[in-house]
Image (cartoon, rainbow, N blue to C red):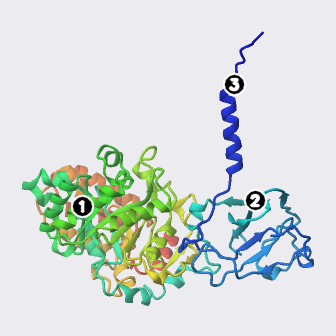
Amino acid sequence: MCYKIKFPFLYVIIYILLIIIKLNHGNSKLNYNKTYTHGRVYNNLVHTVNQYNKKRSKKEIENKYIRNKNIILPSSNTEGRNIYISYLNKQYNNNNNNNNNCYYKNNTKKRYIKKKNYKNFYYYIYCFNTSTNSTFLQKKINIQNYIYKKILKCSNMSILSEKSIENVISPCEKKYKLEDIISNGINYDYRKINEKSTTPFIQVAPMINVTNRHFRAMVRIITKRAQLWTEMIVDNTLLYNLNNLEEHLGFDNNEHPIVCQLGGCDMNSMSEAAILVEQAGYDEININVGCPSTKVANKGAFGASLMKNPEQVRNIVYEIKKKVQIPVTVKIRTGVDNYDSFDFLKTFIETVSSVGCNHFIVHARKAWLKGLDPKQNRKIPPLEYYKVYDLCKLYPHLKFTLNGGIQTIQEAIALLNGYMPENYNNNNNNNNDTSNFIQIDNYNINPLNGIMIGRACMENITVLSQTDKLVYNQDIPSTAYSRRTILEAYKKYLEKNSLFYNLSSSFELLKPVLGILKGMPGHRIFRNKLDTYIRNYTSTLPCSEILEKAIADVDHIAPGCLDLPLHDYNLQKEYIKNY
C-alpha cells in the first residue's frame, strides 16, 4: 500500500537558508590590494590564533604581548600606532603590562573558543581611544588559510563591516579648547593655500523665504567679505517670467561675491536658466542637490532626490558649463534615504566632477525624503563631518565646503583650521558639546575651502559680526560695532524705499531684524512690538519709522542693551547676569 507523503518544502527551504546565513556570517574579506586612505586607526590590538597546532610558549602562557611590525593595517598612515599580537585561548588579565596601551577589563576574563576543522585563520583588530571612554570598533579579517577560527564575544564592541572599516575615525588623544584654536584666527598655512583663490571662507547658506534681497542687505551691513547666496530659484520660474527677471534675480552691487542657486532636473531648462543668471551678473551658479522638501524632492523630482542619479546631475552640470563662463558648483548631502554609504558618496563626487565641477558644498547629514520634513532633516540625521574631511583627502584637486550644525563664527574657524568638536555626532545635534575639539589627521593635504552657516545667522544675525576680523583679517565695518549701529544702518536701507507698503511686504522687509536680540534682554519685547506695529501702522508709517518705534521700546525695557559692543562677549554676559 502506497501513501502520499506531504513534504513541508517551505520549512526545508527556510532551514537551508538559516544554515547558509549561519555559515557565512562574518566571513567578509578585506581586500589587501586596495589602498585605504581614510581609515584612521589608533592603538590597535591585533589578536591572532597560533598558526600551528602546537603547545604555547612560555611567553604566551605569561600573557606577554609581542610587538609585530609586519601586520598590514587598513590605513595608509601607520605612524604612531601600537600593534600587538596575542594567541588562541588567551585570557585578559588586569595585572599585565600596563605600558602597552592595552585594554583590560577589571575582574573579568575572556576566553576564546577553539574549534577544530576550520580552514580560515583570522586576525581581530581593535581600534580604540586610550581615554576613559572605552568604545571599541572591531573588525574580523581573513588573512590566510589555516586551521583555526576564534570567536570573541564582547558586549561593549560594535562590529564593523568590511565596507565601513575604511570610514572609521578614531580621534586623537589630545583635546583642544576652542579659545586656543581661534586665538590666532585662520591657520597661516591654510590661508597661504587659499590666497590663490578668490572663493570666500564663509558662506551664508541659501534658505527659502529667508535669503532674499533684504536679508542679504542686512548681512552686508555686518560683513563685507562673506559670500552671499540667493534663495533657490526654480529654472522654470525664470523661463516663464522673462519680463520680470528683476524680481527674481535683482541684487545690489555691494552684494558681491554672490551665488545664485538653481533648482531643476531638466538639463536643457537648467542650462537656459543659467544663461539668464550669468547675464544678471552673478559670480557663481550652484545646483541644488540637497533640499529634502517634499514639494522639491518628490513632486519636483529635484533637490535631494537627484543624488540618487549622479549621471543626471553630471549631465546638468555639463550642459550648464557649455553655455556659461562663471563657475558651476553643486550643493549636496552626505546621502539620501538608503543611499548613504561612503562608497556611494565617492561615486557621486567622481561622476559629477568628471565634467569639470570642482567645488562641492556638502551638508554633512543624510536626508530622509519620506518620514521627515525639512525641519526634522536639519536636526534628526546625525552630523557626519568626518566624511567631508575624508573627501578633502581623497580628492585634493577638488574644493569642499562644509555645511550643517555650525552655530558660531568661532566654530567655523575651528573647522577651517582642521579641528572637529569631540562630541559632534551625538544624537542631540542641536546642542553639540564644543568645549573640546580634536585635530584632523593630515588636514594640510586639502583643507576645507569654506564653511557655510545657515539657520544660526537667520536666528541671530550678529553671529557674523566678527567674520571680517577673525576670518579675513580685516577691519570690522563700523556699522557692525553694536546692535544699534546695525539697526540704524538697516533703517537707512529701508528709507531708500520711502513709499508705504502693504502688510505682506512690510513683514518681508522687517523680517531680517527679528533675531538681532536673541539671547539678550528685550528680545521678546522687540519681536512682539515689531509685529504689533506692522499690523497697526503699515498703512500710515514707512517701515523705517516702525522699526524706530520698536527700538525705542527696547531702550525703555533694557537700557544700554543695543549699545553693547558685539566683539566683547564678556561684557554681554555680564549685562545679562546683572539685568
523 to 373, vertically: above or below: below
Q: Amino acid at mark 2?
A: Lys
Q: What residue lies at 29% left-to-right and 46% top-to-bottom?
A: 300
Neighbor class of circle 2 (other Cα within 10 Å; few <14, some 14-19, many 20+) is: few
318 to 43, vertically: above or below: above
Of callouts 1 and 2, which one flags the residue occurring earlier in the amino acid sequence?
2
Q: Quadrant of residue 100?
A: bottom right
> Disc 3 designates what residue?
8
Q: Is disc 3 placed on a helix, strand or loop?
A: loop
Q: Is residue 520 visible?
A: yes
Q: Is disc 1 placed on a helix, strand or loop?
A: loop
Viewer-closest of 87 and 96: 87
> Which label lies toward us, 1 or 3?
3
Q: Is residue 557 visible?
A: no
Q: CA distance from mark 3 to mark 2?
A: 34 Å
From the top left corner, tell me how far across and down residue 66 is, in percent. Answer: 80, 80
Q: Amino acid at mark 3?
A: Pro
Q: Quadrant of residue 243?
A: bottom left
Q: Amino acid at mark 1?
A: Asn
Q: Is residue 232 left or right of residue 188?
A: left
From the top left corner, tell me how far across and down residue 65 is, in percent. Answer: 82, 78
Of callouts 3 and 2, which one flags the residue occurring earlier in the amino acid sequence?
3
Q: CA distance from mark 1 to mark 3?
A: 68 Å
Q: Quadrant of residue 496?
A: bottom left
Q: Is disc 2 placed on a helix, strand or loop?
A: loop
> Disc 2 designates what residue?
119
From the top left corner, tell me how far across and down residue 184 is, in percent. Answer: 46, 88
Discs 1, 3 touching: Cβ within 8 Å = no
For residue 212, the mark is 1
Q: What residue lies at 70% left-to-right and 80% top-to-bottom?
A: 70
